């Protein structure tokens, strides 16, 4: 993880956050995200075959019409 990644974006809310605990650092942000019901991005693990990747490289997806769409950024490798 890196600075700027919220725990729900890394799916840490599923295993490392107790919503019934008293006060904790970041409680307001975490509770707000939970009440909204979604995050706008996710931290995912990718497997790359046959090559090296570097942090900062863009991940792109080729759409059915042939255009490329930005799908994310490599944050660590």
Image (cartoon, helix red, strand yellow):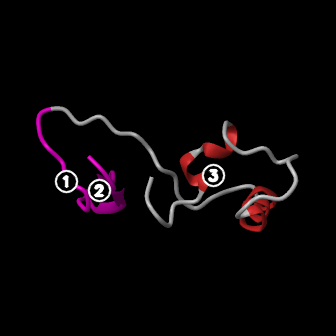
Quadrant in the rendering for residue 15: top right
| Residue at disc 3, secondary structure | helix
Q: Is residue 56 one of those drawn in magenta?
A: yes
Q: Do the residues labelled 2 and 1 touch (CB within 8 Å)?
A: no
Q: Residue 54 carries which label?
A: 1
Seen in the picture, residue 44 relative to 23 is either above or below; the reply is above
Q: Give the range drawn in magenta.
A: 50-77
Q: Which of marks 3 and 2 is nearer the N terminus?
A: 3
Q: Taking 73 as reference, is 6 left or right?
A: right
| Residue at disc 1, secondary structure | loop
Q: Are marks 1 and 3 in contact (CB under 8 Å)?
A: no
**Of labels 3 and 2, the one closer to you:** 3
| Residue at disc 2, secondary structure | strand
Residue at 40 percent across and 40 percent down: it is 45
Q: Residue 37 placed where, x, y %?
A: 75, 55
Can you identify the residue that label 3 sits on? 8
> Around disc 3, counting alpha carbons within 10 Å, would you say few (fewer than 14), some (14 to 19), or many (20 or more)?
some
Marks 2/1: CA distance?
Answer: 14 Å
Can you identify the residue that label 2 sits on? 60
Choose between 57 and 12: the one closer to the eye: 12
> Around disc 1, counting alpha carbons within 10 Å, would you say few (fewer than 14), some (14 to 19), or many (20 or more)?
few
**Of labels 2 and 1, the one closer to you:** 1
Q: Which of marks 2 and 1 is nearer the N terminus?
A: 1
Q: Is residue 57 one of those drawn in magenta?
A: yes
Residue at 57 percent across and 53 percent down: it is 9
């Amino acid at each position: 993880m890196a600075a700027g990644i919220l725990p729900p974006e890394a799916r840490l809310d599923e295993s490392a956050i107790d919503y019934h605990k008293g006060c904790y650092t970041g409680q307001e942000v975490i509770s707000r995200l939970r009440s909204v019901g979604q995050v706008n991005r996710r931290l995912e693990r990718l497997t790359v075959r046959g090559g090296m990747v570097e942090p900062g490289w863009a991940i792109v997806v080729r759409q059915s019409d042939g255009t490329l769409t930005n799908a994310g950024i490599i944050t660590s490798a």
